[in-house]
Amino acid sequence: MMTLELKEDETSIHKAAAILREGGLVAFPTETVYGLGGDAFNPDSARRIYAAKGRPSDNPLIVHIADMESLDRLCPRIPERLHLLADAFWPGPLTMIVEKRPELPSETTGGLDTVAIRMPHHETALALIREAGGYIAAPSANASGRPSPTLASHVWEDLNGRIDAILDGGEVGIGVESTIVDLSGEVPTILRPGYITEEMLSRVLGEVSVDPTLMHPDATARPKAPGMRYRHYAPKGSMQLVEGEAADVTAEINRRIRESSLRCGVLCTDETKALYEGGLVRSLGNRNDLSSIALQLYRALREFDKEGIEEIYSESFPAEGFGQAVMNRMLKAAGYRILKTGGNKQ
Ligand code: AMP
Ligand code: MG
């Protein structure tokens, strides 16, 4: 299949919407990462999405909408909590899980009786959703297991020839996937951390819990978002997170690179960049600017892949606020491998 390259103009959005209405697949920009869209009410579109990504078909898609009226066709009872969170954070990087209507194909929801819904904060995405009929099912537009795309060229790398079109909207704004909160149970539960933090959600809802498997892999517990079970966000090289005092971290990484015979890469910050003595050194930005760290992470991992980096050492960040999302993605990319440095090893 020939993959069309489209710009963000009106004619292109028109063309992309027509492709979606006919059951085709279009990758499109959102404020979080690029999505791979299909018509949410067309089971064939969902099947095509799974096939194009090489994604297990029990891993449900997020349904993207452009207005609140669209909720009625998706869920039979709209919880009050959804309204509260929508008022506060939609359009925006928040996905909410609620009971689904039987009319929504189970292919779209990976066989679950709930549906994940988001209204993205992105003009092109909203225009495309409206023109395509109101409901675009979309996971991230990467090949399954690879880092999510933050540039159209990333989508191209993974999916050229496997989807109908890519709408190029330049670089995304946030760079990690949406926060997912499950509203289908008694206590709202964060299944995936993102830009909308636990604190922001509890300011609106009161009690919010966090799926305990998010920051620690636990062989006995199954993450509630099926997607969080799979190896994910992974670079080709093997990655380790290094924790400890800044000076210990740089010393340990320098020592390991010196002793390694493999091609090494370092993910670091502007403050420490000059301290590394070998390997391909990539700063993610200022240590205190988590927005930059988040936006650069997947891009840097893809750059390392291109450079044939076999071993990646990364500095780590405090898992607080938006840092929880950043560390969750880093931990997953590293397969939860952490090196503790300094005298105080625990
Ligand atoms: P992606 O947009 O590629 O990150 O994929 C969508 C994410 O949403 C995956 O992690 C899914 O497991 C999760 N998800 C979608 N629908 C549901 C649902 N009904 N219940 C739990 N998780 C969901
Ligand atoms: Mg994904």
Image (cartoon, rainbow, N blue to C red):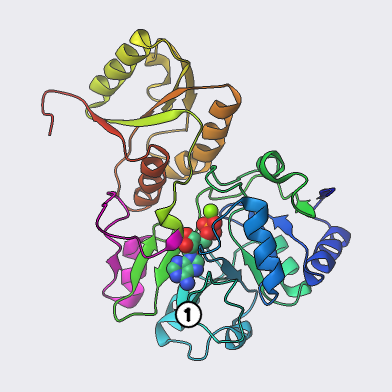
Q: Secondary structure at mark 1?
A: loop
Query: Is residue 54 located in the magenta-colored stretch of the structure?
Result: no
* Of residues 321 and 131, the one drawn nearer to the viewer in this rendering: 131
**In the image, residue 221 lies at what x, y percent?**
27, 59
**279, above or below 317, in the image:** above
Residue 56 can be seen, yes or no: yes
Tell me where residue 10 appears, x and y as whole percent.
Answer: 85, 62
Cβ at disc 1 under 8 Å from ligand 1: no
- Residue 1 in the image: above or below residue 335: below
Residue drawn at point x = 32 percent, y = 39 percent: 317
For badge 1, the amino acid type reads Asp
| Residue 24 location, quadrant | bottom right
Q: In which image quadrant can residue 153 be found? A: top right
* Percent of width and height locating residue 173: 58, 50
Residue of label 1: 113
Q: Is residue 334 above or below residue 105?
A: above
Along the line of sight, the residue nearer the viewer: 215 or 315: 215
Question: Which range is magenta?
Answer: 197-226
The reply to whether residue 29 is in sight is no
Furthest toward the right, the residue is: 11
Residue at 37% across, 22% down: 272
Left/right placement of residue 323 relative to residue 39 reads: left
Q: Main SS type for the magenta part?
A: loop
Which percent across, then down, holds residue 128?
Answer: 74, 66
